[in-house]
Structure formats: C-alpha cells, structure tokens
C-alpha cells in the first residue's frame, strides 16, 4: 500500500514538472508581460461537494490540496479528500467557522498555501476576504477584490449594468437601511416586490412580498437570513417580475482583458428562490435573445475588467424582454451543466487564469466554444416536498447512487453512516445527466434517480422524478412559477423502504424485546412443584435396554411382540409445546426425570427433543438444546428418547444440504437420541427418504411417518383416500423403516376412520410395529386411540393428565384406566400417573403467562372442518388475542379453511401448516375472500412462505400445485432479503444503540432507542399531536427568536417563534387563539422534529 501511495505521489509530481515545463514554453512564446506563477498548493475555504470538486481538479493538475473544517464537520468527506486538513473557527457556531477570515488566512500562511479557492456561498462573494488574501500574499482564485466588491454589492452592480446599457428591473439605488425605505419603494412601484441580500445569493435573504401586511415580517426574515448566511444583513428592493424565466450566462475572463461566454443555463425551476433543476442550454430560447443575453454578459464583464469565472443572471419575461439581476462573482452550483455541454473544465480554467495564463493560451476562444448536446442537473436534497420542502436531518442508514453512461455525480456528505445536520445546506448530491437533447437527458436522469436508495432522511427524489416526467418540462418551456402551478408534482410515489423497516423492527426487538402485547395478566405461580418420592438405586430395566442390546431391528421386533398397549409420553415436548408455547425449562424437566425413570420404565419412549424445542431453547430460554438432551439422558437412562425430524428440514424450516442432515442425526445419536420420527409436511417421498437414510446411518431407530389429513371414512373426501395412505406406507416399508407412524397433527382421526386406516395397515403389514400420534383438540382423542389399539396399533401417544387434552395429546390416565384389565393393559399404575400429574399441575403454574388456557378455555370440534394442527391452533388463538382480534378468531379459522382450499388442500404439518396460516392471516388482514384472492392473484403481494411453497421449496404436494392459482402468482419477485444480525452497540447520548446487520452481503446498521435506558435520561418533551394547544417544531433546527411571552394572548396565525435550519428560516404560527401557558424553548435552543415549543389554552 505504501508503495502504491508513493508511486501515485511520484506520478503527480512528474505531472506537475511536465506541466511547469509546458507552461514555461507557452509563456516564452506569448506576447503578454505578466509573470506566470504556478500554483503548488490550494486551500478551499469551503466544505462539501464544491470543496471536493476543486480538490479533484487540483489533483488532476498536480497541485497539493488543503481542506478546512468546522468542529461540526469532523466526520465530513471533504476532509478526507484533501492532502491536508485543518480545523478552523474553534468554539464558533457551525456557519461562523467558515466565515472566520483571520483564522482561514492564518491556517493558509502556516501551511504554505499559494492560493485559496472560495467555492460558492460563505466567503465566496466577500470582497474583504479577497482583500485579506491579497494582503497576506495568498492568491484568491476569483476576481480581484475590487470587482468582487462591485459585483457583490447588488446595488453597485445594478448601476454598472445601467452604464453598460444592460436593461435592469426597477429597484432601489442602494441597500435599504430600515423598513420605512422599503415601504416608500412599495408605495412608488406597487406590489409585488422582492427583498434580496446585497452581499450574497443562492436564495438566502430573498423574500417576495405580495401585499402591505406581509412587508414587515418578510423584511425581518430576509434581513436575518442574509446576516446568518453572509455576515451582512443589508438588503435592496426590486419590483418583482412575475412568471419570468431565470436565465444565466457563464462567463470567463483572464488577466489580459479577454472575456468569453460559455452560453446560458435555464434555472427557472425553483422553490423559495432556490434552484432545484438546472439545464443547459435553455430550451426553446430565441437565437436573437440568446445573442443579446451573451453579448450583454460579456460587455458587462469587460466594463469592470472581470477575470476568472462568473455568472451573469437575467430574468426573461413572457414578452422576451430580459432584465439584469446580478453577477455571481464565483463558481455556481450548476456550473456542471455548462461543463457537460461545452467540454470546458471551469475549475481547471479558474486555476490556470489565477496562475497568469490567458484564455487563448488555454484554447478558450469564443469561436471555438460550441454547444454539444444537452445537460440537466438535479439537486438531491434532504428536504421533504410533502411538508413544504422542510429540511430533514438524521443519519444516512443507506446510501446507494444511480450511475452509468451519461451520469455525473458531485457529492460529499452522502455516504452510509453520514450524519446530516441542520447547520448547513440541505444539498446531498448533485446528479448531472447528459444526452443529445432534453428528452434523452431526462430519461437518463430519471433512470439514475430511480436507482438511488437513501434511507434515514427524507429526500426530494420522488418530487424530482415527477418534474422529469412532466410534459410541460419535457416539451414546453418553464418559468419560475412552474412548481407552484403544477401541484401534481406533489403527488409523490411513496418510498417502500422494506428492507430498512425490517431492520428497524429486528433491531427494536434485539434492543427492547418483543413488542407484541401479551393478553395474559397472570403471573407465574410462587409455588414450586413437589417431586414425588423416588426409590433408591438404579431404575428398572426398560425398552432402551432392549434397544442397546438388540439394536433397532431387534427393538422393533420386541415392540411388535409385546402384549398390551405401549404408550409414548409427550409431556417432555409436544404437550408443553401445544399448551405452554414450548417455554418449559430444562430445570423442570430434570426435576421429574428420575421419577419417570423409576415408575414408567415400561413406556415405549419419551418424546423430548426436536421440532420447536430447538429454536425456543436458544431464542427464548437461552438454553442449549444439546445440553438438555445430555442431561436428561443421564437422568432417564432406561426409557428410549424420541425426536421429531422434519425430513430434509431436520429441525429447521427449510431444506438443508444432505451432509448437514446426516451429521445432525449422527451427533444427536451420540448425545442420547434413540428413535427418529421422520416426517415430511407434504408426505413428499424424496424428503422423507433423506431423513430416513440419515437416521439409519446414525444407528437410530427409523420411525417413518405418514402425515394424516382429511377423513378416510368420508366417501366425499377422497383426495387423501385409504388407498393413498396404503401406497405411501408401501414405499416407507420398502425403504426400510423400523416402525410405521401415523402422524395426526390436527387430531382428525375419529374412531371409525381410526379402525379403517390402522386396520388396513395392520392387514398389509402384520409384522410392522404401528405407532399413532394425535391431538385432542376436538375432545375425541381417547376414543380414537382406543379404536386404533383395537385395530392393531402397538403404540399410541399420551400426555400426563395435567398436561393433556385440548390441543395437547389424550390423557395418559384415561388410556391407562380404560385399558386396565383388558388385553391392551399398559402395565402402568394409576397411582404413579396421579403423582406424575400432580407435579406437572403445580409446575404448569410457573408458566402461567404462556398458558393457552388464559385465552382458550376448551378445544373445539370445528377442527374437523378447519384442520388446524394442535400447536398451531394454540398459537393462532393466542396471536389473535394479542392483536385484539380475539373476537375474530372464528373468522381466522374460516380463512384458514379457505386458504387451505386455495393451496390445493394440503397436509398441514410444520412447515406446510405455517404456509396455510400465513395465507389465512394475509386474507384476514386485507379483508379478502377466497374468490378475490383467486381473481387478483396476479397483482397481490403474497407472503414469502406462500410464494416459496408455489416455487417448490418444500417439495411437491400430492396432486400437484393448485392451478390456475399457482400460474397467476408472481413467483420470481427477486426481492429476497438475506439478513444476518451481527452486533449490538453501546448506548449513546441520545439513548440509542446502533444495531449492525449484514443485508444481502452489505453492512447495514440502524439506531434504535433503548426504551429502558431512556427512562433514566432527560429529553426535551415532544408535542402530542392529539393535544390541540401543544405546538411542536415542524422540523429540526435552532430557535432564532421567540416572539411571545408566557401569559400573552395570541391570535390564530400569529407568529410564535422563528426556527432556522440549513440557513433557511421558518416562522411557526399559532394554530389557535388563546393564552400562552408555558414556553419550553428560548433563543438558540436546538430542537428535533416535534419537540414541544409552547402550550396554548383556548
């Protein structure tokens, strides 16, 4: 890196030497006698994009660069673009720092600066600054101090124009010194009139007055703005020309009397007298008028001996008459469009002229200056057009530009992470587009602006896009009333900002936790559960001992040969997932595990892992699911453990690489897992096979699952017929499953359908152990499981009584009692069940805030219609109450049924059940019927899970995808966001934390208020929008003046205070008549948007 930098500087040095030699030769051949003095180091007494523009030109010419910056600009880009950078105006306000002439000169002298470029604004038109440079022996890159003085004084410039024969608008002969002089002028010439700053431009200190009642207030505002922007509040008054075009001519002069023009620019598109869009050349300008404008400009410049770059500005009325306005004795913001159409680098020319070279030497002769094409400049600002172009401040969370052929960008403060302060101009970046003509350049500009992504502050980009699409702009002529008379320009297309909104939400959750209100007032019980007595010694032998001794095949044979009905206890997982949102801690599971080992050794298995256990343990319980498995294995060594494996999804919600699934099963087996119940939400065989192979390769017991839906006993519902399930079972048995499972996630098995399905499976596979899983949502779970046992099932799922019923599994005690004394006897004593249940009844009280019974008092037989799986039924019910939609839960369930039909009647198990649920909630939120969704499928923005399902991300459903619904949904949206949370920052002074993300591979960050920390910090109060008398700041800024006092009576519309932001002043008027009760600000108070200014009572 050092070698590269050194090489670069050597190259620049060589460039400077070659340049000096070339110029020396040129100097020897020229006829003029002035000495050529090359510039070696340039300071720019300015900031932002103009400073960088000059630095780039200097670097191209081999000139070293120096930046200056205020205390508020320590993080600005112009510091970094210069070879050297120095602080000025220490302790001064932001603008005053750049007006501190002695300090700027001091820095220049101390650092061997040859010349100072003033940029535009600030000191650029101050003759005392140009004189200070000359007195210090530092060249001023601009006109002589005397010319700057003459041109900067608008009144004297006007007199010079009159002497040069240039037409002028009627106005005062000198700056007005008081309001009465302005009143006298208006009495003579009538309204409208306009105040203008005598010592600066750019719209600062400029106010149009249309009637006498507005005169005093506008005089004060114009004076104050001019004083703040230029250090001098002097004003002069002119008759205001209505509906003019604003045309300006670029001029360039040298030290030898040569003056040329570089044609004109049209700057008519303005708001608040500040240019928004500039064009070159002017559209549909009469050639004779162009000749008069350029000739008058050159004559005026010669009249005063003008050297360097400048601009002569004119108003052209609707009759084609032109009037001189002023001369800007500096580089203009919009100089870029002139450069684009003439191929003349104006900053290069400024530097060369300052060195002593003549325009002819530089090849700049009038007959060689030609217009080539068309150029447009748009000033992208941090202003909100919807709120009267109020300046916006804040941090640029995202900044992405539009580029490409025909686009030039001049920017400085625009980069991700930059802070836009209220202290300076609102300009963010200048975008310049070039083309053969106006429509071509406008098309490029429109395309470039559409590529911009600016997040964190408001911008005027949507407004600029409307301007560029306006027919009057594209095919007619515009005047200074264009914006005011085309209110459709303010029909702004809303910015979607989807990614940043999502990051803000995620960041808020990371800092402050979930925001969904819990509709449960219950608090955790203060009573700890009592552990039943546990015998001393080792627990009795159980089925795990058979598994360890005989292996998976021998284990399966032992299960099939067992007399009586075997039970799998879901209390350790699915039961509390269905009833307590999976929130049960490992601690409470470990407490009861030894009791289960000693008293329930004849259980087929305990289901305790997989599914939602994984993500809930890590996200909410801050526990390691692997450690849970290890610790429970040590405490419950004799009963097999069973887990859910979602086929190719493993324990996640998307397909994983094959090797990841295989490795997961291997590690799970090593840490104590025994039986892998493998399922796929669509019964999609390729996904099922992968899970089965992974579990088998790990040495586990493979229990392949048939996910059940529909009703095999209903001849009217034959998509999922008995034949369908038997053929699927054939494939699973052929693939080598050790146990066949029927997974009835919604509890749809009725006694008759249980006898039909299990009986048929038993007849077809007499040696295969059959295991049935269900939920008791409808309340028929016990009856269904007894029917399954009678039909030939070997194992059924239960939960201990206090954790059973509703959306959980059927009651263990009920099954034990009903089979006692029959051939299906479970071998479990009811006394042990009672003790086991009592522990969980008390333990359940510890999780009262998550208990489904807070909002759901019973199951519901309508599950036979909506087919909502047990755990999802609980979650949807809870979510509906959390969002205040508990009274609409019936509507949610109905929409779930309709969504399922839209998607082709799916088997509903995670993740397919989530897809149906997402579509159902989408329909409820948007008040859509099934028919409306089908009709508008090609225009609706469906949830991502629905789109990905239709793309085949989770497999192919039985019967194929629903048509024509699938074909109408836009599947390739191209808007996938890949987000990774990286880090959480420290608390800042504003009570915020910076949250860092990786979004689509790029670093992003957002600032999030820490609601807990902010309670201990003091902040300025905010105005409440629903409290009529509270007056808030309409924008961030500083209070210039408070115009009322506490206790004062005010009228509606009366000025209350004056705010200044980005060097523009805004008057805050009273929204109602009343009495000022309290004032919360004083002069120089810094405010954010909506900060409370004062309170008024009616």
Image (tube, helix red, strand yellow):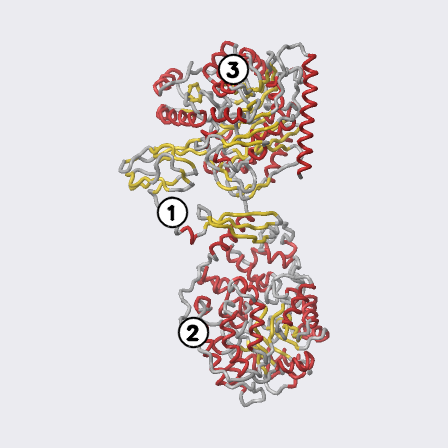
Asked if the residue at tag 2 contacts the one at tag 3, i.e. Cβ–Cβ closer than 8 Å, the answer is no
Give the number of the disc on residue 817: none
Dot 1: few (<14), some (14–19), or many (≥20) neighbours within 10 Å? few
Asked if the residue at tag 1 contacts the one at tag 3, i.e. Cβ–Cβ closer than 8 Å, the answer is no
Residue at the image point whose x is 59% and y is 11% from the top? 257
Q: Is residue 1031 left or right of residue 612?
A: left
Residue at numbered disc 2: 528
C-alpha span from label 3 to label 1: 53 Å
C-alpha span from label 1 to label 2: 42 Å
Image location (x, y in percent) of residue 698 = 68, 71
Residue 862 visible (yes or no):
no
Residue at the image point whose x is 66% and y is 57% from the top? 951
The image shows residue 1035, relative to residue 341, as above or below, that is: below
Q: Earlier in the sequence, mark 3 or mark 2?
A: 3
Dot 3: few (<14), some (14–19), or many (≥20) neighbours within 10 Å? many
Image quarter in which the C terminus is found: top left
Residue at numbered disc 1: 1018
The image shows residue 484, relative to residue 572, as above or below, that is: above
Residue at numbered disc 3: 147
Image location (x, y in percent) of residue 437 = 64, 27
Rendered image quadrant of residue 959: bottom right
């Amino acid at each position: 890196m050092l070698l590269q930098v050194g090489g670069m500087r050597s190259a620049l040095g060589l460039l400077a030497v070659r340049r000096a030699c070339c110029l020396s030769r040129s100097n020897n051949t020229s006829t003029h006698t002035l000495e050529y003095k090359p510039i070696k180091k340039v300071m720019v007494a300015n900031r932002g994009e103009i400073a960088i523009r000059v630095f780039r030109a200097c670097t191209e010419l081999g000139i070293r660069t120096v930046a200056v910056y205020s205390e508020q600009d320590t993080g600005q880009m112009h510091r970094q673009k210069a070879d050297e950078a120095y602080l000025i105006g220490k302790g001064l306000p932001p603008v005053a720092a750049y007006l501190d002439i002695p300090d700027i000169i001091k820095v220049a002298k101390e650092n061997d600066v040859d010349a100072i470029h003033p940029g535009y604004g600030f000191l650029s038109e101050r003759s005392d600054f140009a004189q200070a440079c000359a007195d210090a022996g530092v060249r001023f890159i601009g006109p002589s101090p005397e010319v700057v003085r003459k041109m900067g004084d608008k009144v004297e410039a006007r007199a010079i124009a009159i002497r040069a024969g240039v037409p002028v608008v009627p106005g005062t002969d000198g700056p007005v010194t008081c309001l009465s002089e302005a009143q006298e002028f208006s009495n003579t010439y009538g309204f409208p009139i306009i105040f203008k700053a005598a010592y600066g431009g750019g719209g600062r200190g400029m106010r149009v007055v249309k009637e006498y009642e507005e005169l005093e207030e506008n005089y004060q505002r114009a004076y104050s703005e001019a004083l703040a922007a230029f250090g001098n509040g002097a004003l002069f008054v002119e008759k205001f020309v209505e509906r003019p075009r604003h045309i300006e001519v670029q001029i360039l002069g040298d030290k030898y009397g040569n003056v040329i023009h570089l044609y004109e620019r049209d700057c008519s598109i303005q708001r608040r007298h500040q240019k928004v869009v500039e064009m070159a050349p002017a559209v549909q300008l009469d050639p004779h008028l162009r000749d008069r404008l350029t000739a008058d400009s050159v004559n005026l410049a010669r009249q005063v001996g003008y050297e360097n770059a400048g601009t002569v500005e004119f108003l052209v009325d609707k009759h084609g008459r032109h009037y001189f306005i002023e001369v800007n004795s500096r580089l203009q913001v919009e100089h870029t469009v002139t450069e684009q159409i003439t191929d003349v680098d104006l900053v290069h020319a400024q530097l060369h002229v300052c060195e002593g070279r003549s325009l002819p030497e530089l090849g700049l002769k009038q007959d060689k200056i030609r217009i080539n094409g068309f150029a447009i400049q748009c000033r992208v600002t941090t202003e909100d057009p919807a709120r009267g172009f109020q300046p916006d401040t804040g941090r640029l969370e995202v900044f992405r530009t539009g580029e490409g052929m025909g686009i030039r960008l001049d920017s400085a403060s625009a980069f991700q992470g930059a802070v836009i302060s209220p202290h300076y101009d609102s300009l963010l970046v200048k975008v310049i587009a070039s083309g053969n003509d106006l429509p071509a350049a406008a098309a490029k500009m429109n395309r470039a602006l559409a590529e911009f992504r600016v997040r964190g502050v408001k911008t005027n980009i949507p407004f600029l896009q409307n301007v560029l699409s306006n027919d009057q702009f594209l095919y007619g002529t515009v005047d200074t009333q264009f914006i005011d008379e085309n209110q459709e320009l303010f029909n702004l297309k809303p910015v979607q900002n989807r990614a940043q909104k999502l990051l803000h939400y995620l960041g808020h959750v990371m800092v402050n936790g979930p925001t969904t209100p819990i509709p449960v007032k219950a608090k955790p019980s203060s009573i700890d559960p009592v552990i039943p007595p546990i015998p001393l010694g080792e627990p009795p032998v159980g089925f795990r001992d058979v598994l360890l001794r005989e292996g998976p095949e021998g284990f399966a044979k032992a299960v099939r040969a067992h007399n009586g009905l075997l039970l799998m206890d879901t209390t350790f997982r699915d039961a509390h997932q269905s009833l307590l949102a999976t929130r049960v801690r490992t601690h409470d599971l470990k407490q009861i595990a030894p009791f289960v080992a000693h008293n329930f050794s004849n259980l087929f298995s305990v289901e305790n892992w997989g599914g939602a256990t994984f993500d809930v343990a890590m996200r909410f319980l801050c526990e390691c699911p692997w450690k849970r498995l290890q610790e429970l294995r040590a405490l419950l060594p004799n009963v097999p453990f069973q887990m859910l494996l979602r086929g190719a999804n493993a324990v996640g919600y998307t397909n994983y690489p094959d090797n990841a699934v295989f490795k997961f099963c291997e590690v799970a087996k090593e840490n104590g897992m025994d039986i892998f119940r493998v399922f796929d939400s669509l019964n999609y065989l390729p996904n099922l096979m992968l899970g089965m192979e992974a579990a088998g390769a790990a040495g586990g017991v493979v229990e392949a699952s048939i996910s059940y839906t529909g009703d095999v006993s209903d001849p009217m519902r034959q998509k999922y017929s008995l034949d369908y399930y038997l053929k699927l079972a054939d494939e699973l048995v052929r693939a080598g499953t050790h146990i066949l499972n029927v997974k009835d996630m919604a509890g749809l098995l009725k006694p008759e359908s249980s006898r039909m399905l299990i009986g048929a499976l038993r007849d077809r596979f007499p040696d295969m152990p059959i295991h049935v899983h269900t939920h008791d949502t409808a309340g028929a779970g016990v009856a269904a499981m007894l029917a399954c046992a009678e039909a030939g099932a070997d194992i059924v799922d239960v939960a201990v009584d206090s954790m059973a019923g509703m959306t959980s599994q059927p009651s263990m005690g009920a099954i034990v009692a009903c089979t006692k004394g029959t051939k299906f006897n479970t071998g479990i004593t009811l006394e042990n069940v009672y003790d086991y249940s009592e522990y969980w009844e008390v333990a359940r009280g510890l999780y009262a805030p998550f208990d489904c019974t807070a909002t759901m008092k019973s199951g519901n037989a309508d599950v036979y219609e909506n087919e909502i799986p047990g755990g999802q039924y609980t979650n949807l019910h809870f979510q509906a109450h959390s969002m205040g939609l508990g009274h609409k839960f019936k509507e949610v369930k109905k929409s779930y049924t309709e969504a399922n039909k839209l998607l082709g009647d799916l088997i509903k198990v995670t993740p397919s059940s989530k897809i149906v649920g997402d579509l159902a909630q989408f329909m409820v939120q948007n008040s859509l019927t099934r028919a409306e969704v089908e009709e508008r499928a090609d225009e609706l923005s469906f949830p991502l899970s629905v789109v990905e399902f239709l793309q085949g991300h989770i497999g192919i459903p039985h019967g194929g995808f629903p048509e024509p619904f699938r074909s109408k949904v836009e599947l390739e949206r191209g808007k996938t966001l890949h987000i990774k949370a990286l880090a959480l920052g420290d608390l800042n002074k504003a009570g915020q934390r910076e949250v860092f993300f990786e979004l689509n591979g790029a670093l992003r960050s957002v600032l999030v208020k820490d609601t807990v920390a902010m309670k201990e910090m003091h902040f300025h109060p905010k105005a409440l929008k629903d409290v009529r008398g509270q007056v808030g700041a309409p924008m961030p800024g500083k209070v210039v003046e408070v115009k009322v006092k506490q206790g004062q009576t005010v009228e509606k519309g009366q000025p209350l205070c004056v705010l200044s932001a980005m060097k523009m002043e805004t008057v805050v008027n009273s929204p109602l008549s009343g009495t000022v009760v309290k004032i919360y600000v004083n002069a120089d108070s810094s405010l954010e948007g909506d900060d409370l200014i004062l309170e008024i009572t009616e």
